[in-house]
Structures are given as structure tokens and as C-alpha cells.
Image (cartoon, rainbow, N blue to C red):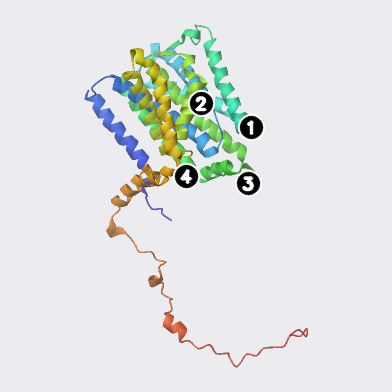
């Protein structure tokens, strides 16, 4: 049976693709007022990749992970090292970028499997501690590496990709990430994953392979985190392990929580707004006012949390939110001429009986039938 096309299921693809095309045209025609806008776009697409990939673990699987920056660190260092080795042969080109993303993503996914194994037995705070320890261990290993391998404490020097094209690659990777995660969550596998979040015991009782699905979620999440790390390495001339501390993992988690648990669109919006806010605060508050960056950033986050959870604002949130806007757009794009009446309505049922006929019907007993007495002697 053919399913009806619903535009609300693809609105995020359309918006991301439209913005990507718009910014691409602006970059190719040199319409940006400042070259810094291209760097801001790079940071935004990296943050969106990280937030959407973490939302699978936290929002849909229901596990608390604080080591997402560790997977990004693995991708940044390994992908950056591959780019350094390939640059003398292929140059700073698209093949170098693609190979580096493949290596960084696959290696990060392998670490995701390694972390996913203890996740089969750990939940809640215990899993958060394990993932947090993983991120710190990875960061410490790269920090104490030799200068010839990964640069040590000074960091790994990596080639800077062209600003006009790197954010375009980032938009493409965001679309791929959305396609993979949304299709997975809308399938039977996604229903199995959310059932594990709701009740792992009930999921096991119904025959769901909890081990397999947890490994799949951690692998997919860490893969795209590794891709984000590779994009980060090409966006900067130097990759330092200090940038991947647990504070960065918490910042990514904040994006997921503020966007709404289990909401991909919310994670995209929250990642964009938080990254844009951080960039603007760093740009506006300079000199002596730089000390106010973290203070204002924290105040804004607190206000957002209050807005999302205050009971007095519930009606306002339900009336003015992204979902209601999407529903209005989808409803307006439907053609009224193509709408079909509900075939289950009473006036379309061919076997209906008018109520007057029911009231005027006389019920008579068939004289050919008789009531036989109970052989057991019971009345």
C-alpha cells in the first residue's frame, strides 16, 4: 500500500538544503559582508552534527553520555593526521577531505563500539562516568603523545581547507546525518530503540535484542561525532586536546536538552542558536568586557530553560512553537481539490439502516423453533 507523502516529515531537509544553497550562492558570489561569516557557518554545522548525533544516545536511547567530545577528538586527530600525510600527494583537495572524513568517522565508530560494550551493563550515572572517563583518557593520550606523531601538548598542525567550500561539505554531512538518523528512528529499529528507553526489561521480554541496538546507536552517534571532528581539524590550523574537555561534552549535551529530548529539529535549532550566541558574545564583548562572556552566556541558557519548563508558559509554548508552524505550512500547501472524504463516515456506508426503520421493526419468534428443556434438570 502506497503511503501518502507528508511534507512535515521532510521540512528539516528542505530548510537545511535551502539554507545551504543560499549560503553557497552567497559564498561563490562574494556576497558575505565579512569572511568571518564563513567561519561562523563552519562552527554552526559542526555543532549541529554533534547535537543531532548525541540526541540519538540521550534523547532516543535514553542513555546519559558525557564523552561525545572524546569521539570528536579521535576524529579530529586521526582525520587530521591522515590529511597531513595525504597533503604532499593529493594536496589540500576534496579527495583528501573525503578520505580523512572516512578514516576519522570509522575510527570514532570503532571507539563507539568499545564504549557501547560496557553500556550494555551500565545505565544512568555509571554510564556517564564511563563516557566521561573515556573522553578524558583520549584527550590525555593525545596531549602526551610525541611531537612527531600527534604534536603533543602543542597540538597537531593540520591544513586549512578553503573557507568557501568547507561549510558546504558541512551542510551535506548534516543532510546525510539527518537522513541516516531519521530513517532509522522512523523504522522498526527506531521503535525498538525507543522501547529500550521506556523500559529495558519490557523490551527484553518482547524479544528485542538490546545488545545489538545499543551498539548500533553508539556506533552511529560516534561516527558522526568523528566526522564533526575531521571538519573541525580542517577548519583550524591546529588541533589541541584542550579544546575537547568534558566542558565541551556538557555544552553539546546542553544543546540536546534545550532542544528537547528526542527532538532532532529541536537539537538543530538549539545548536544553531547556542553557537551563534557564543560567537556573537566573543565578538561583541572584547577587552575588559570579555569577562562577562560566560556570565551572559549562562544567564541566557537559564532563561531558555525557564521558558521551556515554566508551567505558566505552557499555553504560549504550545501555541507558538516550531511544530505548530510546520503544521500550518503543511496544511496550507495541501490542495483542497484533492482531499478525499473519509470513507468510514456514516453517510458513505452502503449497509446503513435508518433510525426510523429500526424503531418500526417488529421482532417475532420463528414458530418452527422451540426451546428445549435442560436435560440436566436445571431451570
Which residue corresponds to mark 3?
A: 202
Q: Who is closer to the viewer here, 47 or 75?
A: 47
Query: Is residue 275 in sight in this rendering?
Result: yes
Q: Residue 362 appears at what percent x and percent y?
A: 50, 88
Rounded to the nearest angstrom, the CA distance separating label 2 from label 4 is 24 Å
The first of marks 3 and 1 along the sequence is 1
Crowding at dot 3, Cα within 10 Å, few <14 / some 14-19 / many 20+, comes out as few
Q: Say which of marks 3 and 4 sits in front.
A: 3
Q: Secondary structure at mark 4?
A: loop
Residue 260 figure quarter: top left
Which residue corresponds to mark 2?
A: 68
Q: Secondary structure at mark 1?
A: loop
Q: Who is closer to the viewer here, 71 or 123?
A: 123
Question: Pointer 2 and pointer 1: residues touching (CB < 8 Å)?
Answer: no
Which residue corresponds to mark 1?
A: 122
Q: On the rendered structure, is 1 left or right of 65?
A: left
The first of marks 3 and 2 along the sequence is 2
Q: Residue 237 appears at what percent x and percent y?
A: 39, 13
Rounded to the nearest angstrom, the CA distance separating label 3 from label 2 is 28 Å
The first of marks 2 and 1 along the sequence is 2
The first of marks 3 and 4 along the sequence is 4
Which residue corresponds to mark 4?
A: 186
Residue 114 figure quarter: top right
Q: Say which of marks 2 and 4 sits in front.
A: 2
Q: Secondary structure at mark 3?
A: helix
Crowding at dot 4, Cα within 10 Å, few <14 / some 14-19 / many 20+, comes out as few
Rounded to the nearest angstrom, the CA distance separating label 2 from label 1 is 17 Å
Relative to 267, does residue 167 appear above or below in the rendering? Answer: above
Amino acid at each position: 500500500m502506497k503511503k501518502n507523502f507528508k511534507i512535515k516529515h521532510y521540512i528539516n531537509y528542505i530548510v537545511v538544503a535551502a539554507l545551504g544553497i543560499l549560503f553557497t550562492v552567497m559564498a561563490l558570489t562574494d556576497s558575505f559582508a565579512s569572511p568571518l561569516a564563513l567561519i561562523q557557518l563552519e562552527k554552526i554545522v559542526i555543532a549541529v552534527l554533534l547535537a543531532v548525533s548525541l540526541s540519538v544516545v540521550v534523547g532516543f536511547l535514553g542513555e546519559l553520555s558525557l564523552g561525545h567530545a572524546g569521539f570528536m577528538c579521535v576524529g579530529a586527530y586521526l582525520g587530521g593526521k591522515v590529511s597531513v600525510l595525504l597533503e604532499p600527494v593529493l594536496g589540500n583537495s576534496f579527495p583528501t577531505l573525503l578520505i580523512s572524513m572516512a578514516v576519522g568517522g570509522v575510527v570514532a565508530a570503532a571507539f563507539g563500539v568499545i564504549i557501547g560494550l560496557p553500556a550494555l551493563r551500565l545505565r544512568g550515572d555509571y554510564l556517564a562516568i564511563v563516557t566521561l572517563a573515556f573522553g578524558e583518557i583520549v584527550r590525555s593520550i593525545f596531549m602526551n603523545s610525541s611531537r612527531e606523531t600527534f604534536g603533543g601538548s602543542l597540538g597537531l598542525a593540520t591544513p586549512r581547507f578553503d573557507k568557501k567550500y568547507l561549510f558546504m561539505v558541512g551542510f551535506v554531512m548534516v543532510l546525510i546525518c539527518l537522513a541516516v538518523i531519521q530513517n532509522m528512528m522512523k523504522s522498526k529499529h527506531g521503535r525498538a530503540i525507543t522501547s529500550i528507553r521506556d523500559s529495558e526489561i519490557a523490551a527484553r521480554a518482547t524479544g528485542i535484542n538490546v545488545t545489538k541496538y545499543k551498539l548500533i546507536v553508539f556506533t552511529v552517534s560516534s561516527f558522526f561525532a568523528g566526522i564533526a571532528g575531521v571538519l573541525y581539524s580542517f577548519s583550524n590550523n591546529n588541533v589541541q586536546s584542550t579544546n575537547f574537555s568534558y566542558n565541551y561534552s556538557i555544552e553539546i549535551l546542553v544543546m540536546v536538552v534545550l532542544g528537547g529530548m528526542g527532538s532532532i529539529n529541536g537539537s538543530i535549532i538549539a545548536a544553531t542558536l547556542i553557537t551563534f550566541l557564543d560567537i556573537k558574545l566573543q565578538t561583541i564583548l572584547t577587552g575588559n568586557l570579555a569577562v562577562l562572556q560566560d556570565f551572559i552566556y549562562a544567564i541566557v541558557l537559564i532563561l531558555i530553560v525557564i521558558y521551556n519548563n515554566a508551567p505558566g508558559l505552557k499555553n504560549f509554548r504550545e501555541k507558538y512553537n516550531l511544530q505548530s508552524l510546520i503544521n500550518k505550512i503543511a496544511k496550507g500547501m495541501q490542495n483542497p481539490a484533492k482531499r478525499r472524504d473519509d470513507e468510514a463516515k456514516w453517510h458513505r456506508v452502503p449497509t446503513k439502516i435508518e433510525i426510523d426503520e429500526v424503531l418500526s421493526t417488529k421482532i417475532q419468534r420463528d414458530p418452527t423453533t422451540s426451546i428445549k428443556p435442560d436435560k440436566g434438570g436445571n431451570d
